[in-house]
Amino acid sequence: MGDDECVIVVREFDPSKDLTSVEEVEKRCEVGPNGKLSLFTDLLGDPICRVRHSSAFLMLVAELSSTKEIVGMIRGCIKTVTCGKKISRNAKNNDPTKPLPVYTKLAYILGLRVSPSHRRMGIGLKLVLRMEDWFVQNGAEYSYLATENDNQASVNLFTDKCGYSKFRTPSILVNPVFAHRLPVSNRATLIKLSPSDAELLYRRRFSTTEFFPRDIDSVLNNSLNLGTFLAVPRGCCYTKESWLGSDKFLCDPPESWAVLSVWNCKDVFRLEVRGASRMKKTLAKTTRIVDKLLPFLRLPSIPEVFRPFGLHFLYGLGGEGPRAAKLVNALCAHAHNLAKEGGCSVVATEVANREPLKVGVPHWKRFSCDEDLWCIKRLGEDYSDGSVGDWTKSPPGLSIFVDPREV
Ligand SMILES: CC(C)(COP(=O)(O)OP(=O)(O)OC[C@H]1O[C@@H](n2cnc3c(N)ncnc32)[C@H](O)[C@@H]1OP(=O)(O)O)[C@@H](O)C(=O)NCCC(=O)NCCS
């Protein structure tokens, strides 16, 4: 390759002329180790789809100056999230013993891709550095990204070259959507909350959870949000008919309750598992046919994942009381049935590694990822709030709030 061919220009993605070439790079980039099954993402013609629901986002491309060929890209977004909590003596705080969230401006990197023919030439590094410039210009205090633990190239790039440190290792839990409906426990009553009721509940109970987005209202009012569902023990005083709002509910909640929200990723991107043998595909298809023909047997069939498929993402999962995990289980069954109606192949969620409610989330180990690696970096020295110190050094909490806009 001649020297001038190697001159790389990093510039903002231009949808009017870059769509096809960006899609080409995306197709050539396998995520997952070579030789095994790999996961392809179809962004449905919109390369910015995975960041565009955040209030500030940017996509950059790396272009060869000589041929104008696009050989890499990166997406990023910035939002305000909870990074810790504090006890405030402020008069406005009704209950002085109740911790308040400490917010920070957090940037997120995703969708970094470099064409296989142009790797190890410093392009990935250049894209990250340029994205970080934009983060800093826009006041972000931290930057983070999620990657697979065994993605050596990406882990090395971020930890060795860019100063990120390994921060959290939440679990991605994935459950197939069967051809039959799942029964929802008759020991639970499910109530669909309005976005404003959901907002109130989340702000009151979850705003001190790490990564809680301060603009939770824009998540809940987004058209991709399919609803927030509350589960209470059947027989308690709360029912759909007698529901008087989250305010009343939180003043006198039942001993146990649980909540979760459903996000429609199917309209944002499709996934596809590639590299499976013909035998595996046939076997999977056979289980589906049997399940479709005999749904009353409730056989756990393997969904269509070898062709582009959609998913629903469960977020904002939480609850209180000794039966909370059981109630989460009922909510997951309901979410499964919603995903089945929506033509999805899987339901996924991501929770903190030590999340106590994890036991209530049904998932297939083979589809799931025990430790998704989140790396973080502190971008500036000035903090908007000094009371948490350096977030990157803080121990993990029991829960995290995974923003569905960034799935
Ligand atoms: C990860 C990826 C973007 C790196 O892009 P790249 O342009 O090859 O990276 P760079 O040339 O800038 O490499 C910078 C540093 O990263 C590390 N690195 C990059 N590729 C590596 C590899 N294959 N093995 C080990 N370390 C690697 C090295 O520390 C490297 O510095 P060095 O070349 O001086 O040793 C690229 O491999 C890719 O597109 N992979 C598939 C998609 C993906 O996994 N994206 C990351 C998701 S977060």
Image: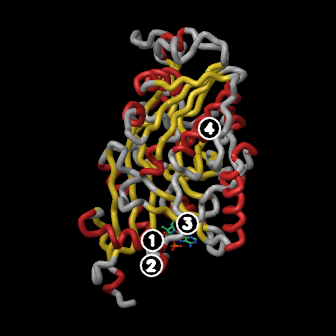
* Residue picked out by circle 3: 31
Q: Is residue 48 above or below residue 378?
A: below
Identified by mark 2, the residue type is His
Give the mark toward the camera: 4 or 1.
1
C-alpha span from label 3 to label 2: 16 Å
Which residue corresponds to the image point at 57% horizontal and 42% vertical from the top-left? 393
- Residue 232, quarter of picture: top right
Q: Is residue 41 left or right of residue 353?
A: left
Crowd around label 3: few <14 · some 14–19 · many ≥20 (10 Å): some
Residue 118 numbered tag: 2
Q: Where does the image place residue 18, in percent across and percent down from the top left?
A: 30, 69
Which residue corresponds to the image point at 66% horizontal and 19% vertical from the top-left? 233
- Tag 4–tag 2 contact (CB < 8 Å): no
* Residue picked out by circle 4: 395
Q: Quadrant of the N terminus?
A: bottom left
Label 2 near ligand 1 (CB < 8 Å):
yes
SS class, disc 4? loop
SS class, disc 2? helix
Identified by mark 3, the residue type is Val
